[in-house]
Image (cartoon, rainbow, N blue to C red):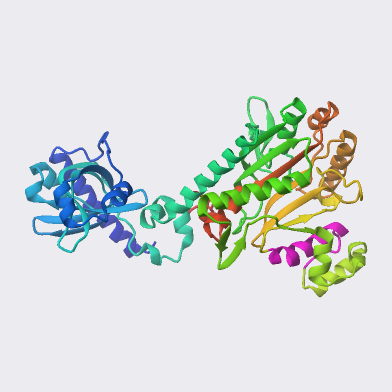
Amino acid sequence: MPETAMDELNEQQQQRIKKLDALREAGVAPYGTRFEVKDRAGQLIKLHAEKPKEVLEEEKISCTFAGRIVALRRFGKAGFAVLQDGSDRLQVYLKKDHLTEQGYRIAELLDLGDWIGVTGTLFRTKTNEFTVEVAQLTFLSKALRPLPEKWHGLTDVETRYRQRYVDLIANPEIHGIFATRSRIIAGIRAFLIERGFLEVETPMMHPIPGGAAAKPFVTHHNALGVDLYLRIAPELYLKRLIVGGFPRVFEINRNFRNEGISTIHNPEFTMLEFYVAYADYQDLIVLTEELVSSLAQQIFGKTVISYQGKDITLTAPWRRWSYHQAILEVNNLDASVLQDKEKAIAAAKELAISVDPQWPLFNIVNEIFEETVEPKLIQPTFITDYPIDISPLARRKDSNPELTDRFELYIAGREIANAFSELNDPLDQRGRFEGQAAQRAAGDEEAHLVDEDFLRALEYGMPPTAGEGIGIDRLIMLFTDQASIRDVVLFPQLRPEK
């Protein structure tokens, strides 16, 4: 912040501290105690804001509510203040003749940002504004910092994320995003419980990171004297529960991945994972369609929503498209590219995609998929039949053991969900773990380690099972029309403040 702006801020803070002292001298606690709120601004507006002046005068509706002052106009021995209560705002009228002596002294010392409680009567002003005529004024909390001016004009979005508390004050519409987030999570939970799923909690610190291809965060447990890893996925613990006899389990969980930050990646994020015994990935395709379309119906009353200027149709059924076929069709490539590394490198170069010649073939092919196919998957699409090389936990296809019974769901050009028929053959799983461990030894920090306890669990026998993970943050981005994950996470991870 420039020095002149800092000086101005300090001066304003000093003035507010003087008012705080004046409140104390008047016998008013500047940081008060309990206040009995009987009404909410939104409720008063909904019930009475459309009533004409004459009806309000006749009904003499009394109310008691509280909020933060976000606008303040004084003239003579009266004034108007606008109180923000959650995402709603309601004007109050403060007049000396209607207040106690102490109440009017409080009114004289008010600043933008202060919290107050009021009791009064609903009426309309001469300009027909719906207002509360205050009879009793209670001071609740003094704001020592001024609210930002012209907050909507700020171009430094990082300040909005870093000071989310101010963002919520200055932009009450932001409340709606996080209210929708809460409704989506509640809707997911209700949907699964209604279908016989049991909600469970699994560890967030793992002795061996697993369940996804990701670089973990490392911490240390002093008492045990061991390094532990923040959870990158709950998958292997949830499958242990299937082994133990729970047929349907789910967890709405926080995951942590030590990766880059972007508009669709945050180092900690919220994921839904659920597992169904005796099912396969085809069953989860239908369940996913039902879940997402029912959420849209519940929140919007329809299954066609708008995202970043495009209509997204969530009405089932959604497109199914095999992984390799999508790559070939989108790029008009010959199938030999999928089998020949030199041809794959040449194809990537022709498509202006940067790849490392040292990469294995499947990595080069996957880079082509991510760069060329993903951005085109705007309408809901299940990409199926992923190769086994990039699916270390999925069951092999009976018809082609080089592929897996797996799908990823894409909407608006990004992955929303990942699911597969689970690998329940402990010998096959050990071989794949060992292959992943070899990749890790060769420098791949995202490859799996061998989890002996999970292998032991599989050796006790896991029934045929299908499992799925849905990125809740990305789903909420879709449902709230937000382009960045930071806009749907209350406190996104940021670089340290200078």
Left or right, 275 with reference to 98 = right
Could you tell me which residue is drawn at 34 percent across and 65 percent down?
150
- Horizontal and vertical percent for residue 84? 31, 51
User: Picture coordinates of residue 75 (x, y %)?
Assistant: 12, 60
Residue 361 relative to residue 54: left or right: right
Residue 60, compared with residue 325, is above or below; it is: above
Residue 417 vs 234, above or below: the answer is: below
Residue at 59% of width from left, 65% of height from top? 311
Quadrant housing the N terminus: bottom left
The vertical placement of 237 against 358, above or below, is above
Residue 141: in sight, yes or no? Answer: no
Residue 167 screen position, x and y as percent = 41, 55
Left or right placement of residue 188 versus residue 242 in this view: left
Farthest-out residue, bottom: 350
Residue 148 lies in quadrant:
bottom left
Q: Which residues are magenta?
A: 354-377
Q: Is residue 359 magenta?
A: yes
